[in-house]
Amino acid sequence: MKNKNFGRFLLLWTGELISSIGGGLTSFGLGVYIFQQTGSAASMALVTLLGFLPTLVLSVPAGVLADRYDRRLLMMIGDGCSALGIIYILLCMMRGGGTLTQICIGVFVSASFSALLEPSFRATITDLLTKEEYSKASGLVSLAGSARYLFSPVIAGFLLAVSDVKLLLFIDICTFFLTVVSAAVVRAGIGTKESEKKDPFWHSMKEGWKVLTEKRGVLMLVAISSAITLFMGMFQVLAEPLILSFSDAKTLGTAETICACGMLVSGLILGIRGIKGHYARTLSLSLILSGVFMAGFGIFEKIIPICIFGFMFFAALPFANNCLDYLVRTNIADEVQGRAWGLIGFLSKLGYVVAYAVSGAAADALGKIGGRGVGRGSALVIMIAGICLAISSATILFSENIKILEVCSDREKGGKEQ
């Protein structure tokens, strides 16, 4: 049963890997398209913000739904219907449109349905796997998430050299249906799993908050995650305009892929071996290094050092994600995983909202000072964000509440093995 369920997880993971690649094609293509049309980092940040807000706002109710209804069915609905927004953008472009407003609408609609996906997917991992398999699964999940940075940019860069953004949108639409099929197969294999006791919706949401506040260490990890997403969100928005300011889309795609290879290497290592202990310390050190490498990313206006620092930045991230996932997952009861992850997703991603709202405008404003341009303005914001990330991550080393989470996880795992 253990091997069979892990095989089902791999099928589900493959679907999410394909979906991530398709989403990365759309994200890259629309980013280049908007920058070419407007030359503004703020316009790129606006599209990113509108694509992110539904995920943030709907993550909590989506988590409650994941505990009340069939999680695989919710994944199928979220993946399948999210194609509607991309189809809308494609139709607008085919009719000669494709304005910033139309792109924002399409991205917003697509993201609204995609919000159903993450809590159900994470809770399904708990349904399928044992605690001993969580660390390996987390490494593979990080690898799937990195596919949008690893494979999509170089593919999109070459496709844009021979075609335009409409081809990327069409490919993304096709990937949605492949992921729906993989979720349907897993659903048929393990059957439906709905909660027999359906408490009032708001009561379920309050239960999710109660779960997080029962252990101060979990709540502290969520607060730290929110600060981390603030700084990383700035990097996410401004890396593309930084490179596009002195290079073209093909070079950008190649550079993003080289940088994301760092996440591939780490993801493979974690997928094979996992992390055996010292989760709190590993979490802190990996995030400190991420901040240092992020700051280095913005120093030079040359593609080679950018690729080197970018590679090291992405190599450090999976270790942090793995530790965060393990410490939280092993300290939350299985039956409330969905609503807990929904609330965790909402709180931890608040930093992204601030980052997407201010980073583009800040880069444009700093670029105008002294006539340095949006590229150097983006670089300066990225360097400041990296320094702040390194400093804030160091606080984890001194948190006793977070260290207690690791002790509780080890005690529970040891008790299960006995």
Image (cartoon, rainbow, N blue to C red):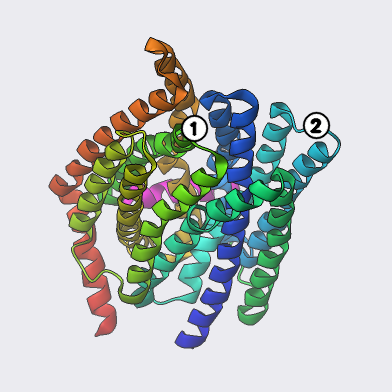
- Within the image, what quadrant is residue 37 found in? top right
Q: Is residue 341 above or below residue 416?
A: above
**Residue receiving disc 2:** 97
* Foreground label between 2 and 1: 1
Dot 2 amino acid type: Gly
Determine the image quadrant of residue 89.
top right
- Residue 273: percent from the left, percent from the top? 30, 75
* Label 2 Cα neighbours within 10 Å, binned few <14 / some 14-19 / many ≥20: few
In the foreground, 101 or 348: 101
* Residue 379 among those drawn in magenta: no
Of label 2 and label 1, which has the lower sequence position?
2
Q: Is residue 204 magenta?
A: yes
Q: Are marks 2 and 1 in contact (CB under 8 Å)?
A: no
**Residue 74 occupies which quadrant of the picture?**
bottom right
- Picture layout, residue 363 above or below residue 237: above
User: As drawn, is 416 to the left or to the right of 65?
Assistant: left
Image spot of residue 227 (x, y percent): 33, 37
The answer, for residue 222, to whether it is visible in the render is: no
Which stretch is magenta? 201-214
Tell me the kind of residue under disc 1.
Pro
Residue drawn at point x = 15 percent, y = 48 percent: 397
The front one of 355 and 174 is: 174
Instruction: Name the residue that disc number 1 marks.
Output: 241
